[in-house]
Image (tube, helix red, strand yellow):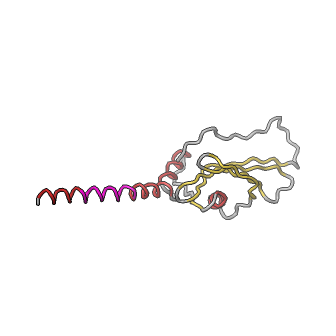
């Protein structure tokens, strides 16, 4: 009888560990990916910000960019390219007929949706004569995954 109780207890503990492990992993992933979560806190620290940045999760790559950039984001999406684990989106600002501009955004897919990771842009005002011999844009080669 004592052996049966002991085996039953071991079986119950094993079943609880098996059931709680995926839930614990899912809870950690959510705490990492949510807006203002652990990943956002790490990014804020790398960028030297005093407060954590809040990068929202969206249903699409375009939505992730629009939600991160804010309600006044007026660029139009002109091309997107799938890459390992995410999407690179190219945009142009609307209403800038005399300017050349290009914005590039990188979003990453996770189990909760799409999240903005990195982005930047480049613009030249063609109505003003340039005195520069060289115009360039710098984009980091490696970006740590968060």
Is 101 on the left or on the right of 62, as rendered? right
Q: Residue shown at 69%/40% (left/top)?
A: 138
Residue 90 percent location from the top left of the image: 73, 51
Considering every residue shown, the one lying at the far top of the view is 133
Is 98 on the left or on the right of 78, as rendered? right
Is residue 16 in the magenta section?
yes
Residue 46 percent location from the top left of the image: 53, 44
Residue 17 percent location from the top left of the image: 31, 56
Residue 43 percent location from the top left of the image: 53, 48
Which of the 4 quarters of the picture holds residue 21? Answer: bottom left
Is 14 on the left or on the right of 61, as rendered? left
Considering every residue shown, the one lying at the far bottom of the view is 71
Considering every residue shown, the one lying at the far left of the view is 1
Q: Main secondary structure of the magenta part?
A: helix
Is residue 65 in the magenta section?
no
Q: Residue shown at 13%/56% (left/top)?
A: 3
Which of the 4 quarters of the picture holds residue 135? Answer: top right
In this rendering, the count of numbered labels is 0
Q: Residue 5 or 57: which is nearer the viewer?
A: 5
Q: Residue 19 or 46: which is nearer the viewer?
A: 19
Is 102 on the left or on the right of 3, as rendered? right
Quadrant containing the N terminus in the rendered view: bottom left
Which residue range is magenta in the image? 11-22
Q: Residue shown at 30%/58% (left/top)?
A: 15
């Amino acid at each position: 009888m004592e052996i049966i109780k002991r085996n039953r207890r071991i079986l119950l503990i094993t079943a609880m560990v098996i059931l709680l492990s995926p839930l614990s992993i899912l809870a950690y992933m959510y705490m990492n990916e949510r807006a203002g979560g652990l990943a956002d806190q790490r990014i804020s620290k790398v960028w030297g910000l005093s407060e954590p940045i809040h990068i929202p999760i969206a249903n699409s790559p375009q939505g992730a960019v629009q939600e991160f950039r804010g309600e006044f984001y007026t660029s139009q999406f002109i091309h997107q390219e799938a890459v390992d684990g995410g999407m690179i989106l190219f945009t142009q600002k609307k209403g800038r007929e005399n300017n050349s501009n290009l914005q590039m955004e990188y979003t990453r897919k996770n189990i909760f949706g799409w999240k903005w990771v990195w982005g930047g842009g480049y613009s030249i005002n063609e109505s003003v004569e340039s005195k520069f011999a060289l115009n360039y844009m710098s984009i980091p080669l490696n970006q740590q995954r968060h």
